[in-house]
C-alpha cells in the first residue's frame, strides 16, 4: 500500500481509506446501503489491515451514531493499528444546538464520538458541513 503524509499533521495515511457508512446501517438512507454488524465489520477490518488500509472513515450522522459504535467494537484491542477519521456538523436531532459548528456543538459531538468509538482520541476530525452562522475564528479556537 502506498502512504502519504497528510499535510503537516504528522499522520501517514494510505492512498485508500475504508468508509464505514454501512456499519450499523439503519433508517431509510443508511439502512439501504447495508447493515454491517460488529462481527462482519471486524472481518472487513482484518482484510483491510492485511492489505495495508489502516484509515477508517465514519461520521456521527451515519445511522445516528451506530456506525461509530460498530467501528469502535470492531477495532477493540487494536486501536494502535488503525487511524480513525470521523465527521461532525450535520443535524443529529431537532434542537437548536443539534447541528452546526458552534464551540458547544463541536465539543459535545467530539465527546460523544469518542464515547461511541471507545477511544480517547480521534486521528482526523472533519467538519461534515459548512456552517455560515458560526464565525470561522470560533470554529478554529475550539480545537
Image: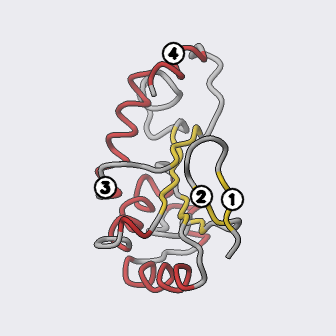
| Mark seen at residue 98 | none
Residue drawn 64% across the image and 49% down it:
6
Q: Nearer the viewer, mark 1 or mark 3?
A: 1
Decide: is 135 above or below 131.
above
| Mark seen at residue 119 | 3
| Mark seen at residue 12 | 2
What is the crowding at mark 4: few (fewer than 14 residues within 10 Å), some, or many (at least 20)? few
Residue 138 lies, in percent from the top left, at 51, 15
Residue denoted by label 4: 138
Query: Disc 4 and disc 2: Cα gap in Å?
Result: 28 Å
Decide: is 132 above or below 8.
above
Secondary structure at badge 1 equals strand
**Image check: 134 left or right of 77?**
right
Residue denoted by label 1: 4
Secondary structure at badge 4 equals helix
What is the crowding at mark 2: few (fewer than 14 residues within 10 Å), some, or many (at least 20)? some
Amino acid at each position: 500500500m502506498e502512504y502519504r503524509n497528510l499535510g503537516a499533521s504528522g499522520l501517514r495515511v494510505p492512498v485508500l481509506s475504508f468508509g464505514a457508512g454501512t456499519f450499523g446501517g439503519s433508517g431509510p438512507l443508511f439502512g439501504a446501503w447495508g447493515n454491517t454488524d460488529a462481527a462482519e465489520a471486524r472481518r472487513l477490518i482484518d482484510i483491510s489491515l492485511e492489505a495495508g488500509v489502516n484509515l477508517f472513515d465514519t461520521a456521527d450522522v451515519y445511522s445516528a451514531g451506530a456506525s461509530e459504535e460498530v467501528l469502535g467494537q470492531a477495532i477493540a484491542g487494536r486501536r494502535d493499528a488503525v487511524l480513525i477519521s470521523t465527521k461532525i456538523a450535520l443535524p443529529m436531532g431537532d434542537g437548536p444546538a443539534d447541528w452546526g459548528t458552534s464551540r458547544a456543538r463541536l465539543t459535545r459531538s467530539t465527546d460523544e464520538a469518542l464515547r461511541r468509538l471507545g477511544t480517547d482520541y480521534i486521528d482526523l476530525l472533519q467538519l461534515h458541513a459548512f456552517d455560515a452562522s458560526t464565525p470561522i475564528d470560533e470554529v478554529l479556537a475550539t480545537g
